[in-house]
Amino acid sequence: MNDEKQRLNYVLFLVAGAGLVNVARAMTLSFLAIKLQQSFGLGPAMIGMLLGIGPLVGAVAAPFAGSLSDKVGRKTVLTLTLLSMALAMVGMGVAQTVLAFCLAQIVAAVAIAINEPISRALMSDVCPEPLRLKYFSWRYTAINFGFAVGPLIGIAAGAASTMLFILAGIVYALFALALHLLKVPLHRSGAEPASAPGASVLESIKTAIRDPRLAFFVGGGTFLLAVYGQWSATLAPYLSGSIAGGVEIFAYIVSINGAVVLIGNPFARRFIERAGALNALVIGCLLFLAAELGFLASSGLWGLAISMVVFTIGEILVVPSEYLLVDGISNERNRGSYFGAHSFSTIGNFVGPTLGGLMLGLFGGPGMFLLFAGFAVLSAILFAVGTRMPPPSASVELAPAAAAEGAAGPHLRGLYA
């Protein structure tokens, strides 16, 4: 019982920390596209490309960081990642040129790309399997609390002001210190999860990539992230350039996104428990489709707000469902490798703003929104196919726990309820 209380306290610490650091993130990074447009005079295509470079590098770095966390521990990797994020925030705050600003932004984006999968793996390390959806839901609620409050703080203090970036850096540094000082209460006895004995980082990554289910999840996740991962990088330039009062409307929409998550996430969690992860994810993709068409048809605050509500309901369905699907094909020995390999899908954070910004520059809003609508449909198809794929063949060397779970067949833990 004491161990259970210790794990619960640690989970609450991780949830509270996620909320706090995302307040800091939202009050600064939400306005990067607007800052690049207004302060440096860059166009939509260039903004999209610059904001997409960091996630592209992060997509390559995250699998290595995830596999490394299986060996040296999640806490060590997360602490270093948060410290890098703190330095990057300060760098963006004091940068005087586009080059310096973008270099700091790339470091921040890479740190975010690494932080997310390892944080999810750490949550799974601490939580017993039946409680993971609940705790993932709590964490996602806290994150979106940050995105509900952060943009309003950013608008009140002045979008992308130097002091906000420095304050955000201090928040990240303090969370890194607290994370370093606290012991991780794993829900299994023994040392922190590790890869199969003698397996190198590259071998662990290769083993994860050879799982055909994960390959389809990576493809589906890439298109999902292209739709929702950096929607602010494309929607902000569209609103500021095409809609009267677009900057203010954008701030309201970001806050609506976070507020709907806070209200709707408990209901979404219960729906996922009843419908199953795959069904919930497919429904979320269809809601993304409807929301993109809604953005296309809207010309004022009310239409855009309603479309954002629909978009956000899709988001709170697909995010925890995707976590569950990946968690369902991993185990305590390779969880970091699987979540890390799945983070190849963060290339969607490059595809989304880059192609979206290009389509916005060439064809305006219709081209961009129809592109994202198509991505949502394609993502649903890839996840549906992936869940029906068999586990890795016996010829692929797996850790003993992975082989035992893989023998159960293509049905995934947490897939149907």
Image: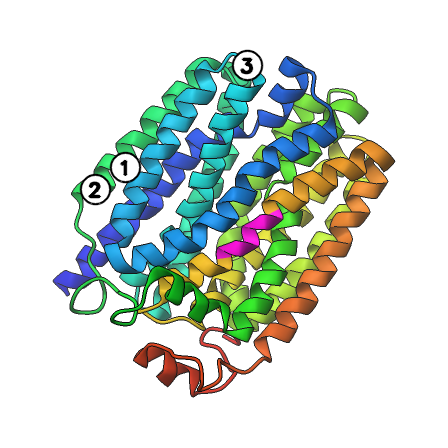
Q: Relative to the observer, which residue lies in front, 185 or 112?
A: 112
Q: Residue at x 61, y 55 (%)?
A: 222
Number of the label disc, if any, that sits on residue 97: 3
Residue to which mark 1 is pinned: 176
- Determine the secondary structure under disc 3: loop
Q: Alpha-carbon distance for marks 1 and 2?
A: 6 Å
The residues colored magenta run 343-348
Q: Is residue 404 left or right of residue 233?
A: left
Judged by its main secondary structure, the magenta piece is helix
Q: x, y percentage for residue 27?
A: 49, 26
Residue to which mark 2 is pinned: 180
Examine the rendered structure and indicate whether residue 253 appears above or below residue 337.
above
- Determine the secondary structure under disc 2: helix
Q: Amino acid at mark 3?
A: Thr
CB atoms at circles 1 and 3 under 8 Å apart?
no
On whether residue 143 falls in the magenta region, the answer is: no
Q: Identify the mark nearer the N-term, 2 or 3.
A: 3
On whether residue 347 falls in the magenta region, the answer is: yes
Q: Amino acid at mark 1?
A: Ala
